[in-house]
Amino acid sequence: MVNSRRDFIKVSAIGTAGIMAIDPITKAIGNTFAAKKGPVRTPTYCEICFWKCAGWVYKDDEGNLNRIVGHEDDPSCNGRLCPRGSGGLGMYNDEDRLKFPMMRVGERGKQTFKRVSWDEAFTYIADKLETLKKEHGPECAALFTHGSGGDYFGRLIKAYGSNNITAPSYAQCRGPREVAFIATFGQGLDSPEPTDIRDCKCLVLIGSHIGENMHNGQVQEMSDAIDKGATIITVDPRFSTAASKSKYWLPIKPATDMALLLAWIHVIINEELYDKKYVEQYTTGFDQLKAHVAANTPEWAYGITTIEPNVIRETARTMAKEAPATIVHPGRHVTWYGDDTQRLRAVAILNALLGSWGRRGGFYNPEKAKVPAIPTPEYPHPTRTWRDAMGGKYELADLALANGVCTATIPNAQMDCHIRAWIVNGTNLIETLPERHKTIEAIQNLDLMVVVDTMPMEITGWADIILPECTYLERYDSIRASQYREPTIALRMPAVQPKYETKPAWWMAKQLADKMGLGAYFPYKTHEEELDWQLKQMGTSLEEMQRVGLKKFERHYDDLYFKEGEPQEFLTDSGKIELYSNTFASAGFDPLPVYTAHPQPEDGFYRLNYGRAPMHTFTRTANNPVLTDIMDENTVWVNPKVAKLWGFANGQKVWLKNQDGVVSSFPIAVRITERIRWDSVFMVHGFGHANKLLTRAYGRGASDSEMITHVDIDPIMGGTGMRGNFVTFLTEKAEGGAKV
Amino acid sequence: MRYAMAIDTKKCVGCSDCVVACQAENNVPIGFCRDWVVEVTDGTYPELELENRSERCNHCENSPCVRCCPTGASHYAEGGIVLVTEDKCIGCSACITSCPYDARYVHPKGYVDKCTFCVQRLKNGLKPACVSVCPTKCMYFGDLEDPNSDVSKVLKTRKHKTLIPEAGTKPHLYFLI
Amino acid sequence: MREEIIVSGRMNELIDPHLQVWNWEIPAYLFLGGLAAGILFFAGLMTLQGKEKEFETTIKRAPLFTPLMLGIGLLFLFLDLKHKLYFWQLYTTIKLESPMSWGAWTLLIIMPVSVAWAGMYIKTIFSNFKWPYPNIAEAFEWISKQKTILAWIMVITSVILGIYTGILLSAFNARPLWNTSILGPLFLTSGLSTGAAFIMILSKDEHERHALARIDLLLIAIELFLIIHMFMGFRASTQVQIEAANMFLGGTYTAIFWTFVVVLGLVLPAALEIMSLKKLKVPYYIAPALVLMGGLILRFIMVYAGQMSRWLY
Ligand SMILES: Nc1nc2c(c(=O)[nH]1)N[C@H]1C(S)=C(S)[C@@H](COP(=O)(O)OP(=O)(O)OC[C@H]3O[C@@H](n4cnc5c(=O)[nH]c(N)nc54)[C@H](O)[C@@H]3O)O[C@H]1N2
Ligand SMILES: Nc1nc2c(c(=O)[nH]1)N[C@H]1C(S)=C(S)[C@@H](COP(=O)(O)OP(=O)(O)OC[C@H]3O[C@@H](n4cnc5c(=O)[nH]c(N)nc54)[C@H](O)[C@@H]3O)O[C@H]1N2
Ligand code: SF4
Ligand code: SF4
Ligand code: SF4
Ligand code: SF4
Ligand code: SF4
Ligand SMILES: [Mo]
């Protein structure tokens, strides 16, 4: 493969009516090398994480995939993919990929499979689902999905008659944040978050580790903000990359953020630093809030958080000084300690006091293009859902809880029928959900377990049927309609034919639907047909999108920010920003956030802190040949004082054992670093793979998930707080130690 | 013409995208790299400082690798870029030994390889691959002799350093601090 | 605590965690080069001084081995090359700034010189020896007549070769341990000393041995002086050189260097040589054997330790 002489499409072939700027590569090389035949770049949007950056896939002269480059006009990436997106070809080239449909032979979970044809696989699934429907009703099926294929399998399972559709990106991720912001502003944040970081003057990061959390547009905007001299305040017990770029780093004692947030609110109210007009005009419950935080002085918070009172005051004043161009960032993976919705309520309240919601440099009002759905018959109305197993709890959850579906799968007295069939698409539940023993117990109670994946992951090992999906570079998917300052749509199309016998999810769902007599819900032959229909409704076409990749639309309303003094209607009960939450009050929860103490580690144990490394996504990239070349295992970060106590040398391998006696399957190398406190350890999530078929990832590093056997369930929305686990070290693996 | 690169350590997050992009652009075989990212942490918790640096060949003006090369394979090209001619290189490793920055590696094919400032892209008016991909836009590239180039402008306004200036190599990779 | 890591996982075993591009081939090559240089130097020198009688082994026998030594040395150099098929590129340019280059050229010159010298004397040693072709014999006849010129060339090129073996390393500013002008003279002296030692082992003539032992004692004294001087220089220099020197003063290489190079390779042989000069009974080959071992280990240590020393930034 030689790079220097790639073919590029002619400049004139790209861009209609000035919709997109000409890609600079094309501009420069297009003239030099006149176009040969056919396009050599095809549009895509990235599937390595859920930021979904739009990009171009380039091929070389021999027609081999050569590289992926960001789409210049995409606000998610501005022409620059992150390392994971740039390394996307590794996913296509990974020789460990799933290659053929497989059927389990022998015991579930024992990883013995035989190769079957697609038809055999579909027949098996269709027959099983048919029987289950007859015996238990269609509500006994559930779909776990995280990724593009969810659209198609979602349609399939709804057509079948079930509404049990869930993603780990809710109860294990941003659920508490959505519920808190909906309760406060009547509106969730969704993804990508409408934070106006580019124009902010003060950015407050509470845990949110942008820079390691490589959500692209956000990282780029933080960098812009640094360029413009914005003050960054980072609250993190670990010296995160973001902390190192911050003017103020508040090395908070873990699990005490609520005290800091209340103290900030206290200072801002007591020093009358809040946006009076805004609070007056848009909010309700200020007086209750004021009374509520009266005792939450910085001195009080100091005792809890270890953050000096003067630092609390100074940072509060800075926030207020730059307001409304101050963002108290809501974070994303916020399921930490079980009172997460309340913590995020405090964040929302703080933003409301600063008047940053709806203001430039704060939170803008995003807009998303509406992609019309192709007409299909009405879906059946299920009579039962996973919620029936919850005993009336978590009513405020606006999406299904992945862990709730697990609970509903384990037979229990409240339900007349537990869930008996799972389709798992693009989520590695074994590593993704905490309390692994519970996930496995649920799986063991299933009559049918279908896994749609691209790689032989932990979850595929538990399948009855494995359906190998081709990678995002080899397929069409639904149109990406991301919310932004302006609405955009982006197309993903195959850059190459699928390798091996892999197939796209849309095709699988349609084949299954046809087999199950549900073909009417997929009224087209190919996905192109559907996409073209949808795009034509939007005033473009598949043909145009194949050329431009991404299209921007005008906003419908000029309401990116609130107009000065203009009245606003919020979608809360009161129609105002609820500092005091009526919804929470009537549901029996604290209407104003309250500090509760959380357990701290016992002697010899350390709080298990985990997070992201910029070059990997969860567990999905751990075998990617390009990205493992950059980082091939995780380490456990240990403070030098702790290392000394244990006599650790840098790089020494240890096993972890948690408070419940669970020992890590694999050893992990110690990284002695000042970046972590003495009461915690840190590790990057996504390593310690146990599936031997992952030749690069197997046994590399250790899994944080394996250590998370304790969860603090958020009483409001059922999120799984995962940061209340404590580990100690073993220098030799305990024989036959408690293993789940 | 004098090409140079500046990297803003205040913005670099150490994501290593520059490395991935370089490997793709320059067909760097798996297991090797022309650029790499260093993280330096100083201090004691919680009094800490951290610097991220994306490093590569410094395209030194007084470059020991060019001097010690017995065959002339290592040479200066236009704009002061230090290059290796593959079929002149005998793989003696002298240049690797001579480089205080450990910027070179032996390509599996036997010759020595390193950052070229992406000459093939420069010829086409493009920025180096690493510069054009960096999500934090913390890399600046251009001609030092052109006062309007990105790199000249940023060096004029920002405090900066080079690595081991005392080695006397006159490096042209600048780090904004 | 200061922590410096490469987060992008550079797993280049030749440079991480520290430089290790040069393995046994290079020190072995340097040793053989220095040894051959030493032998040829004494052969040339004694010839010019007209001491053919007193120094028979020095002039006639020992140099017979030098083409082989140089050949093996070159082979080792070749083995070290990673792009071997392009070896010939070495001889397409002369780059004076590159010790590798002028070293290669010096070898190219000294190799035929050593062959000529050996060819000239092969018959005096093996009286039965016969050249297969008469014109070869004639050629050597002719060469014998130019002996003085050849001796001059030999003295000069062997000194260049000897210095080269040291300068090759000291040209590398990037490696603080090598970054000293003492390395050239040190390796030259050590090369001469190993050359003398080699001749001593071969020589059956006690007078010759004693004469060489006297020379060797002087060389050893110079070497010790240079080594002490080198470390004093490092200690008085920059932090990186202090750290480089520390590898020998309490660090990784301390035991092996002081035991094998200094005590067993210099001090002990010197003592033994003095003893034998004082007519005490010691087997004559022990001292020179130790010198040879010391010289070999010196080169290994300097090549490996030098690669471990680095600039800090
Ligand atoms: N490279 C990369 N980027 C990603 C992803 C990925 O897989 N890889 N995943 C994406 C997804 S889906 C999500 S949800 C986001 C998650 O990214 P974030 O929302 O930024 O993640 P968090 O888990 O909230 O933050 C982790 C940080 O919280 C700190 N922390 C731990 N305990 C405490 C505490 O008690 N208080 C405070 N204040 N801080 C604490 C940790 O030290 C760490 O720095 O990342 C996204 N970006
Ligand atoms: N211990 C622990 N648990 C966590 C987190 C944590 O930080 N620590 N983070 C939580 C958060 S914030 C989130 S959002 C979730 C994320 O949870 P998941 O989305 O489950 O994350 P991954 O581990 O990346 O699993 C993705 C699966 O999809 C497969 N896959 C990748 N591409 C495709 C594709 O194109 N098609 C199909 N069909 N499959 C594909 C991968 O092979 C892999 O098996 O995890 C949550 N759980
Ligand atoms: S942020 Fe990175 S991994 Fe996520 S979609 Fe964008 S390029 Fe892909
Ligand atoms: S791509 Fe940019 S931000 Fe990322 S490591 Fe390289 S220089 Fe730093
Ligand atoms: S950095 Fe190293 S390889 Fe690059 S020019 Fe300087 S000495 Fe040569
Ligand atoms: S390895 Fe190649 S480039 Fe380096 S010094 Fe030797 S010949 Fe020159
Ligand atoms: S300039 Fe080009 S060759 Fe050099 S590191 Fe950047 S991408 Fe690689
Ligand atoms: Mo997430």
Image: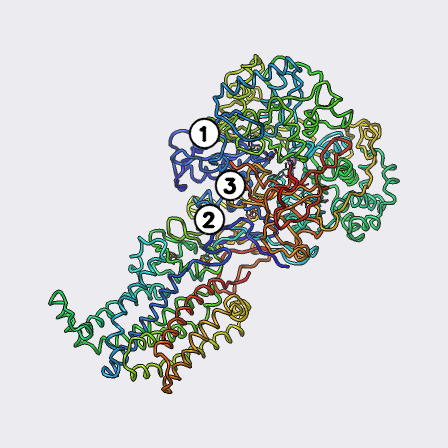
Which class describes the residues within 10 Å of circle 1: few (<14), some (14-19), or many (20+)?
some
Task: Inspect the image, locate mark 1, and give the three-letter code of the amino acid beneath it.
Answer: Lys
Q: Position of residue A35 (x, y in %)?
A: 39, 33
Residue A229 is at least partly visible in this image: no
Instruction: Name the quadrant containing residue A615.
Output: top right
Q: Is mark 3 within 8 Å of ligand 2?
A: no
Horizontal placement of C192 versus A479: left or right? left
What is the quadrant of the N terminus of chain C in the image? bottom right
Task: Please tell me whether mark 1 sits on a helix, a strand or a loop.
Answer: loop
Task: Please tell me whether mark 2 sits on a helix, a strand or a loop.
Answer: loop
- The chain identifier of the residue carrying mark 1 reads A
Marker disc for residue A286 = none
Marker disc for residue A696 = 3
Identity of the residue furthest to the left in this view: C134
Marker disc for residue B32 = 2
- The chain identifier of the residue carrying mark 2 reads B
Protein image colouring: rainbow
Q: Position of residue C130 (x, y in %)?
A: 14, 68
The residue to which callout 1 is attached is: A499
